[in-house]
Image (cartoon, rainbow, N blue to C red):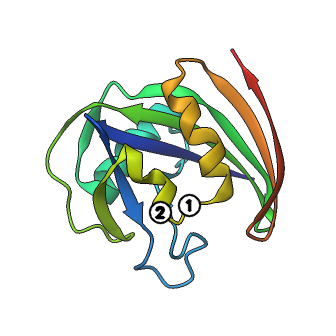
Amino acid sequence: MKLATLCYVKRPGQTLMLHRVKKAGDIHQGKWNGLGGKLEAGESPEQCVIREVREEAGLLIESPRYHGLLVFANFKGEDWYVWVFSAEQFSGSPIDSPEGELAWVADADFDRLHLWPSDRVFLPWLSQGRIFSARFQYAEEEMLGHEVHFY
């Protein structure tokens, strides 16, 4: 089981996205993702997301907004539990990320990005103002289905 966070850093009309093109053997190779990563021992999801955004993008986010939990069942042979956040308050400037190429992407252009199929499902939920809990089932890179509960 893997525990992780995911953050979408926002400014008006744009989201900072990471094009995963730098790391050999990356399970996200070639995809566009938000920022985040695995929890370290004893870390809360909030501590993790702040640390991961700083490491991957060089930004210090303040007051990350919690949106929900994503479960990726048997994704690449492991179950992933991912806490999802967004952040509109931050300081610093994006760095040359070791994970990939960072880019501010117009929210209207998300349809053009090479995303995981599940991202196309849950990204619209971020603007709905409700907390969600969702489970996605994959076979390799094909999404087989999902279920969601909103609160």
Could you tell me residue 52's position as x and y percent?
A: 39, 50
Seen as rendered, the residue at the extreme left is 92
Separation (CA) of disc 2 from disc 1: 5 Å
Q: Amino acid at mark 2?
A: Trp
Q: Amino acid at mark 1?
A: Leu
23 left or right, relative to 71? left
Quadrant where the image shows the C terminus: top right
- Element at badge 1? loop
- Element at badge 2? strand
Seen as rendered, the residue at the extreme top is 151
Mark 2, residue position: 32
Mark 1, residue position: 115
Q: What label sits on residue 69 in the rendered view?
A: none
Seen as rendered, the residue at the extreme bottom is 24
Q: Residue at x 24, y 41 (%)?
A: 60
Could you tell me residue 53's position as x and y percent?
A: 35, 48
Q: Residue at x 52, y 31 (%)?
A: 126
Based on the displayed image, in which of its 4 quarters is residue 95 positioned?
bottom left
Marks 2/1 in contact by CB < 8 Å: the verdict is: yes
Q: Residue at x 33, y 24 (%)?
A: 63
